[in-house]
Image (cartoon, rainbow, N blue to C red):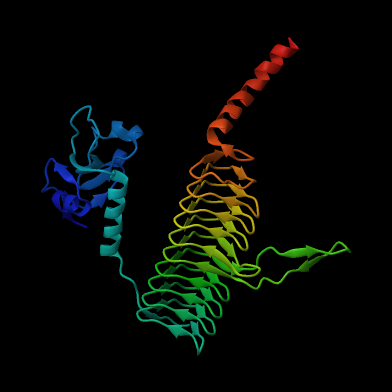
Amino acid sequence: MKFTVNQIAQLIKGTVDGDGSASITAFNKIEDGQEGSISFLANPKYESYLYPSKATAIIIADDLVLKEKPLATLIKVKDPYAAFTILLQKYQEFTSVKEIGIQQPSFIADDAKTGLNIYLGQFSSIGKGSSIGNDTYISAHVTIGNKVTIGNNCIIYPGAVIYNDSIIGNNCTIHANAVIGSDGFGFAPQADGTFSTIPQLGNVVLEDGVSVGANTTIDRATMGSTLIQKGVKIDNLVQIAHNVEVGANTAIAAQTGISGSTKIGQNCLIGGQVGVAGHITIADKTSVTAQSGVTKTVRKEGQILGGTPASPNSEYLKRNALLRQLPDLLKRLES
């Protein structure tokens, strides 16, 4: 990559303060800036790195009040994080070259349909009655079951398994060793103490623009569909049980578990290691802090929840502060 500061500013709709003709050849974190690199400042706690940074250019907020003049040329934008994201995306577009073709050994069922410009890696398979869209990239050692539908411009990384009847939209990414459509955890206790398996007859539906992290599992529905709506981003090592619905543009961090038949609203943020009980509903725009447990339905939109059982985060923090004082209170009572 080699662009001038002016070219980059035009791309991200920014204003240049400094040498717009300087060349940019690399990306760097602001604290590691080097000549020829570009960085950004979005978090105020890193402002101290701005002024001495050796980066050639730094993207900053246009309303940032500078304490001194930085060494670097500045590109001022409304949202530095969003602007830098756009820049990284464009760089990826310029440098990425998708392979095309069917590698051997691999298997495609006779009645499976494959679109234009697909790639199928070695030791991968596409089952009976399945359909793969145009420009989709399927890495090595991927297993795609029967009657699976995958849309256009998807990327499926090595070792992923997509069970029968799953439906995946356009522009989806499924990372390594993810499992889509495995059986839900359905077992009925019997009088003799054993369990009878409940057949899982539904499927999984991923709408457009969904990203599924490595080693994440999404179970098929008992009946109907486990539904992941458009734009949902799921981190690594997440478990989503049968008949769950996740609303559009929700993000779920690693090691979270969502129990069966729960409905999560749109534009929610679920932190790492969160546990969500089954058969509850979480309202739109809810944020749940890491290691919390959501045990009851959340009806009010836009809340930040923390703790177990999860409650408004301000209440949770107050309780924690009081709990830390208990040892001292106990000593005072005992004296």
Total count of labels:
0
**Residue at screen point 78% across, 64% down:** 188
Quadrant (top left/top right/bottom left/bottom right) for the N terminus: bottom left
Location of residue 220 with respect to 110 vertically, above or below: above
Location of residue 53 with respect to 182 vertically, above or below: above
Q: Is residue 310 left or right of residue 120?
A: right
Front position in the image: 323 or 96: 323
The x and y percentages for residue 313 are 54, 35
Quadrant (top left/top right/bottom left/bottom right) for the C terminus: top right
Which residue appears farthest toward the front when viewing the image? 300
Q: Is residue 297 left or right of residue 333?
A: left
Location of residue 29 with respect to 132 vertically, above or below: above
Which residue appears farthest toward the bottom when viewing the image? 110
Location of residue 170 with respect to 56 vertically, above or below: below
The x and y percentages for residue 77 are 23, 44
The x and y percentages for residue 78 are 25, 43
**Residue at screen point 49% across, 59% down:** 213
The x and y percentages for residue 60 are 25, 40
Front position in the image: 67 or 276: 276
Which residue appears farthest toward the right when viewing the image? 192
**Residue at screen point 61% across, 45% down:** 294
**Residue at screen point 54% across, 42% down:** 290
Front position in the image: 265 or 13: 265
